[in-house]
Amino acid sequence: MNPITWFHEDRKRARAERDPCAELCALATVNADGKPEIRTLVLRDLEDTANPTEGTRLAVFINDSSPKWPAMAQVSALAYFPVLKVQYRLACATAPVPEALVHGRWQDRPEAPKAMDWYYAKRPQSSPVASRSQLIEEVGNLNLPEPLVAPPSARGLYLLPFAIERLDLNQPDGIHDRRRWQRPTPSSPRVGEPPIAKAQSAASVLDSGWTEATLVP
Ligand SMILES: Cc1cc2nc3c(=O)[nH]c(=O)nc-3n(C[C@H](O)[C@H](O)[C@H](O)COP(=O)(O)O)c2cc1C
């Protein structure tokens, strides 16, 4: 099965079983100093109007005042569904979500995060502020636009996986099931170069262009 379809199916099962992690991922980036950084983000299902045949895409919503924004050309996302005992690791390129789509979805946000998105123009996300009381006062004193629309800094990024790994701990024999799928992208090694070539000796190519390999768990 196409691994993205498999991921969506697992997520559907996780949602049905009220897995508290079904809507989340941990997203890792490498900053300008070469240091790894990671944080929890909501992982969204979003249509991609430029590629309707691809169906639903994974996406994240962030504010471009954040120091993570310039580091997001390539990201690693980790999703663990405790109820299923299934972990996914996704190595992804990214592409911008059209502004109209981001701004439409932004309207569904609760009041406080909406205000925060406007506040980031005054103080960028993740910058220090003297105290929590100063923060609350400044957010309360914002002149928000009417009608309330998204600021230009509210952004969305599609996650475009070029490598996916699924680890399923829930095996009757106790031996975990671990598989990896890879497909070439402009920014990842081409077939014939490592590491994809290495994987292919024990791998099969799916119709969808993904190369599948079983890994030692
Ligand atoms: C459950 C949960 C969901 C979150 N969802 C988002 C999100 O969708 N977008 C976002 O920018 N930050 C989200 N955050 C906050 C981030 O984890 C992080 O604190 C923030 O983005 C600042 O990270 P940075 O300093 O790396 O920019 C979420 C945090 C938690 C705990």
Image: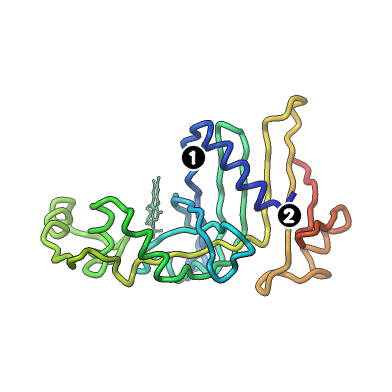
29 relative to 175 in the view: left or right: left
Compute the Cα span from label 2 to label 1. Answer: 23 Å
Which amino acid type is shown beneath numbered disc 1?
Cys
- Which amino acid type is shown beneath numbered disc 2? Trp
Give above or below for 179 relative to 36: above
> In this figure, which residue is indicated by the disc labeled 2?
181
Q: Which colour scheme is used?
A: rainbow
Residue 193 rendering spot, x and y as whole percentages? 80, 70
* Residue ID at (15%, 53%): 136
Is residue 205 left or right of 120 when viewed as pictured? right
**Contact, CB < 8 Å: mark 2 with mark 1?**
no
Q: Does label 2 or label 1 sit earlier along the sequence?
A: 1
Reading the image, the residue beneath label 1 is 21
- How many marks the image carries: the answer is 2
User: How far from the left and from the top, in percent, is residue 150?
Assistant: 30, 66
**Most foreground residue, 175 or 211:** 211
Image location of residue 98, percent across then percent down: 45, 70
